[in-house]
Image (cartoon, rainbow, N blue to C red):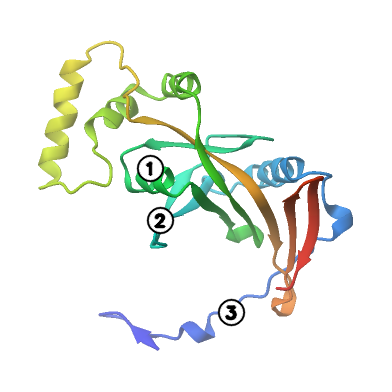
Amino acid sequence: MSSTPGSGPIHLWRMRQEYEGGLSEADLAPDWIAQFSRWMAEAVGFGLPEPNAMIVATATPDGRPSARSVLLKEFDEHGLVFYTNYDSRKGREAAANPQASLVFPWFAMHRQVVVVGRVERVSREQSAAYFALRPRESRLGAWASAQSHVLPDRAALDAEFERVSERFPDEVPLPDNWGGLRVVPDEVEFWQGRRNRLHDRLRYRRIDAGWKVERLAP
């Protein structure tokens, strides 16, 4: 039991919701990208807020993990792409230990997708093409923020934003330390909640001949 000031006790053990749904092998698309595309379209159609939001977990070479929420911006049969400052914590960890896991937590649909794979940078050209689509203020923010580094206060960040706004009154170029990271999957698991916590977990796993579908115990 835990509590918060000004409120009654919070009994976490009482928080229980039965999940409805099911996922059989016969339901699956022939490959992970078709299945992911299907579920992403259904998440968008369901009206989930930011259905492309995902948890990205990385780790240092000695195994110290970190995780954060990031927005998926592109995906195809080669992998799933998000954009970041390469000098950020996740950027540094991905460079030193190029492995990551992604989780799409679609709670309202009683679903999640878990991806595990290696990390690689996308081309400079691809990063530039996406950067050009961002709002001007977001492009300036990429220059102003030394992501993951310690700031003395908020005023320092705001002052740097104003400085780069004056530096780039017109076109805002792509910073050298900013771009895309692609997670190339070795495993993609589709999780569907079911009653009694007997959930369906179906995983595409990369093998020499292509992909193998396996059912995992919940």
- Mark 2 = which residue? 61
Residue 139 quadrant: top left
| On screen, residue 6 above or below 83 | below
Q: Residue at x 32, y 43 (%)?
A: 88
Residue 173 in percent (x, y) is at: 32, 17
CA separation in Å, label 1 and label 3? 37 Å
Earlier in the chain: of badge 1 and badge 2, it is: 2
Residue 8 appears in the figure: no
Q: Regarding mark 2 in the picture, which secondary structure is present there?
A: loop
Tag nearer the camera, 1 or 3: 1
- Report the residue at 49% width, 24% height from top: 123
Q: Is residue 76 left or right of residue 215?
A: left
Distance between the alpha carbons at the discs numbered 1 and 2: 13 Å
> Label 2 crowding class (10 Å Cα cut-off): few <14, some 14-19, many 20+?
some
Question: Mark 1–mark 3 contact, CB under 8 Å?
Answer: no
Q: Amino acid at mark 1?
A: Gly
- Front-most of 38 and 175? 175
Decide which of 97, 121 is in the foreground and name it: 97
Marks 1 and 2 in Cβ contact (< 8 Å)? no
- Residue at 25 percent across and 80 percent down: it is 5
Quadrant of the snapshot with the C terminus: bottom right
Q: Give the answer, above or below, for where 25 lies relative to 4.
A: above
| Front residue of this view, candidates 81 and 93 | 93
Q: Which mark is residue 91?
A: 1
Tag 3 residue: 16
